[in-house]
Image (cartoon, helix red, strand yellow):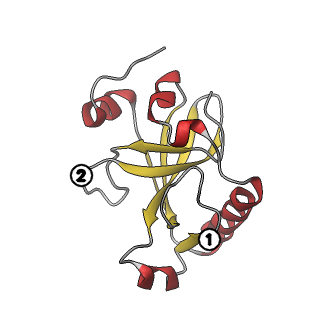
Amino acid sequence: MVRAGQGVLLKLDFCDGSVANYKRPFLVINKDNDYIYLLNISSTKGKEHKLGMKSNKLISRYRPPFLKSSFVKLDSMYIVPNREYIKNYLLCEGRAMHPLELQDIKQCFSDYRENNKFKSKIFNLDRIEELNGTLILI
């Protein structure tokens, strides 16, 4: 089963309403019986200037589950149904990031949410399948 600290590669529409054109990495920061909560991940290459924004946080120990130097976007949460299909999209063979790194990201995310505007988007299985192709439900 999917757990916090793992990465997934999915095509999901952006929280601002823009339609997704490509798959991108997300970090699982939490889950419950119904949903998995994801934060958008971006590589730092060519975007170093974005690290100065309070909505972005550099991931010090990014590997695993991400292969490149990365930052997490704290201003948007992507919420997907908690179902077995998500295992098919795990990065790095399901290896999770270092627990202290995850704890730090969760704390920064919590702090950001308290003091800033924040967006979230809930996806249903039909939209996820439309964007990513047929889901294999185990």
| Residue at the disc numbered 2 | 19
Residue 116 vs 23, above or below: the answer is below
Quick check: 103 left or right of 57?
right
CA neighbours of label 2 inside 10 A, class few (<14), some (14 to 19), many (20+)? few
Give the residue pinned by disc 1: 112
Q: Position of residue 75 (x, y in %)?
A: 50, 66
Secondary structure of the residue carrying tag 1 is helix
User: Is 120 located above or below residue 116 in the figure?
Assistant: above
Image point 45% across, 28% down: which residue?
A: 88
- Can you say which quadrant of the picture contains the N terminus? top right
Contact? badges 1 and 2 (CB < 8 Å): no
Q: Nearer the viewer, residue 129 or 87?
A: 87
- Going 39% across and 19% down the picture, which residue do you hit? 136
The answer to whether residue 78 is above or below residue 42 is above
Who's the residue at 34% across and 55% down the image? Answer: 14
The picture places residue 69, in percent across and down from the top left corner, at 50, 67
Q: Looking at the rendered structure, which numbered label has been put on residue 72? A: none
Res 35 quadrant in image: top right
N-terminal of the pair, mark 1 or mark 2, is 2
99 or 84: nearer the viewer: 99
Mark 1, other Cα within 10 Å: few <14 / some 14–19 / many ≥20: some
Residue 11 position, x and y percent, is 33, 44
Q: Amino acid at mark 1?
A: Tyr
Q: Position of residue 122 (x, y in %)?
A: 44, 42
Mark 2 falls on what kind of element? loop
The amino acid beneath tag 2 is Val
Q: Is residue 124 left or right of residue 39?
A: left
